Image (spheres, helix red, strand yellow):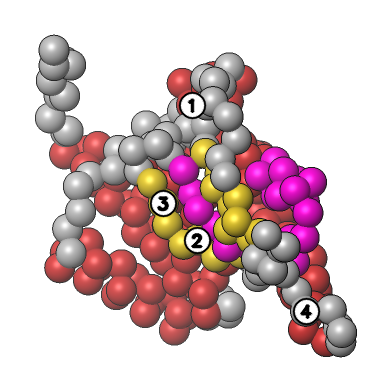
Amino acid sequence: MTGPARKPLTRRVRWRNRAVAVVGLVTVWVLLWGTLSWANLISGLVVAAVLLVVFPLPPVTFAGRIRPLPLARFLVRFLWDLVVASAQVAWLAVRFGHPPRGAIIAVRLRVNSDLNLTLTAEALSLVPGSLILEADRETGTLYVHVIGVRTLDEVERFRHDVLALEGRIVAAVGSAEELDRLRHPEPTGPPEPVDLEGAPT
């Protein structure tokens, strides 16, 4: 049984989706360089244009709306997380006699959309100490390598932080339907397995 056919996107919607993609790509480019400058903005626009023209991807429909206040909250918290995570990673680097442990943690997001998966993965990767290893599009699961995790309680705390990050992103740019999914999440079954590096077997 097939679902209802999707209506073709209008020219206005296609241009809006491209504009959102360009803004997102340029933002990630500037964050990766770490400096807001005209050179980084212009080079980011060039890179975004090349990616959208030379490597066309299936359209990711932006069905939400940008909410200024939640977006500001997301940005402030994201900058705070950058500062805190940088300090934690620096402390792990200079701490002698206690080699840092890591873990590979699976986190299933509540909103399984390409845009939410991408934005959450990018935000996590930009924070020191966490790195996306794989993103399962079918289940909306991110597999994240995290350093400084030693116990299962810390694993669950990290999962909670990722879901809180997802909530801030959806509150900032998500649709009403996605916000409702956060308020009434579907059951996801038993917790995903976790691989604690350096743990005794």
- x then y, percent, for residue 158: 70, 49
Mark 2, other Cα within 10 Å: few <14 / some 14–19 / many ≥20: some
- Amino acid under label 4? Pro
Q: CA distance from mark 3 to mark 1?
A: 19 Å
Disc sitting over residue 135 in the figure: 3
Q: Considering only order in the chain, which callout, 3 or 4, is on the residue closer to the N terminus?
A: 4
- Amino acid under label 1? Glu
192 and 41: which is toward the camera: 192
Residue 150 inside the magenta-drawn segment: yes
Q: CA distance from mark 1 to mark 2?
A: 23 Å
* Label 2 close to label 4 by CB (< 8 Å): no
Mark 4, other Cα within 10 Å: few <14 / some 14–19 / many ≥20: few
Question: Could you tell me which secondary element the residue under label 4 belongs to?
Answer: loop
Mark 3, other Cα within 10 Å: few <14 / some 14–19 / many ≥20: some
Q: Nearer the viewer, mark 1 or mark 2?
A: 2
Residue 133 inside the magenta-drawn segment: no
Quarter-wise, where is residue 23 in the image? bottom left
- Amino acid under label 2? Ile
5 and 39: which is toward the camera: 5
* Label 2 close to label 3 by CB (< 8 Å): yes
Disc sitting over residue 99 in the figure: 4
Disc sitting over residue 132 in the figure: 2
User: Residue at the spot x=16%, y=24% of the render?
Assistant: 6
Q: CA distance from mark 2 to mark 3?
A: 7 Å
Question: Could you tell me which secondary element the residue under label 3 belongs to?
Answer: strand
